[in-house]
Image (cartoon, rainbow, N blue to C red):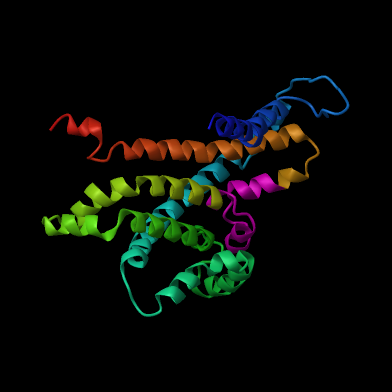
Amino acid sequence: MKRNKWVFFILTFTFSIFPVLFLLVKSVTENFQLSDGTKLRFTLDGWGVLLSENQLAEATWTSIGIGFVVVLLNLWVGITGGRVLAFESFRGKSAVETAILFPLIIPVLAITLGIHLVFIRIGLADTWYGVVLIHLVPTIPYTIRIMRNSYVTIGHDMLEQAKTLGGSGLARFISIEVPLLKPAIRSAVFLIFVISLSQYVVTTIIGGGNVVTLALVYFPFLQSANSAIIAAFSIWFAVIPLLFYLVFELLLTLLPYQKRWRTHE
């Protein structure tokens, strides 16, 4: 058991903590190579270039806004769809479940090109709404899958018991389903936001350059030879989903069944 614990700690440090620490050091130092033994020379030039980017603030808020709406739509579709797939039996259920996974099997770029023609005809191309809708394509399958598995784990009997005791649909959802689904909701929210934030090609095609997200500002920087700028931008890119997740956790504490609310009963 102890050996497994140490293996876990070593793997966590190697693949999670060390890359982040290395990125932090790279963002505040001039170009250096570990192999040639050059000394570290600290500089904030990378962060200076990043913060002087004119579109950084606008792109950040646009990405957060799009990600927030995408998360809400995903939770709505994922919870309702996952519940149906977990508890309902109907003809063609296996085909529906397979069809939901198509965006994960077929390249998203191919789907986007087809949807782009439709969006042009109905006026959603080059708009904020169109970008939100196209971000649903690579995220919805994950959310439905996560929620479906969670509902299967919860089981139908517990929800039926609450219904038998006279709880309304909304009361059952808030008091029973949401608390039991919290781990799945946490996972889905973080995963969806990160996927939405990193969409570059589909945002470029559907947004047409009118919708500037952080990915559109970030990827051209990859052509820069200055590793400090790339590292600073990568950290900026990684901090946003963490802050979004913390805000979401704070919102969860406002739910009425939390412990601090019960103390006033």
Q: Position of residue 237 (x, y in %)?
A: 60, 40
User: Residue at horizontal 66%, vertical 45%?
Assistant: 218
Point out the image quarter for the C terminus: top left
Query: Observer-nearest residue: 54 or 132?
Result: 132
Residue 109 lies in magenta, yes or no?
no
Instruction: Please tell me whether residue 137 is drawn above or below residue 94 in the rendered image.
Output: above
Q: Is residue 204 magenta?
A: yes
Q: How many marks?
A: 0
Residue 173 spot, x, y in % from top left: 24, 53
- Is most of the magenta stretch helix, strand or loop? helix
Residue 81 x %, y %? 37, 64
Percent across and percent down for residue 51 are 63, 33
Q: Residue at x 53, y 39 (%)?
A: 240
Which residue is the extreme one toward the bottom? Answer: 91
Looking at the image, which is closer to me, 20 or 230?
20
Q: Residue at x 30, y 57 (%)?
A: 155
Q: Can residue 51 be seen at all in this image of the molecule? A: no
Q: Is residue 69 left or right of residue 6?
A: left
Q: Nearer the viewer, residue 238 or 260?
A: 260
**Which residue appears at 78% of the width and 20% of the height?**
41
**Of residues 48 and 159, which is closer to you in this image?**
159
In-image side of 119 versus 147 (left or right): right
**Which residues lie in the magenta part?**
196-219
151 is higher (above) or lower (below) than 111: above
Regarding residue 14, the answer to whether it shows in the image is yes
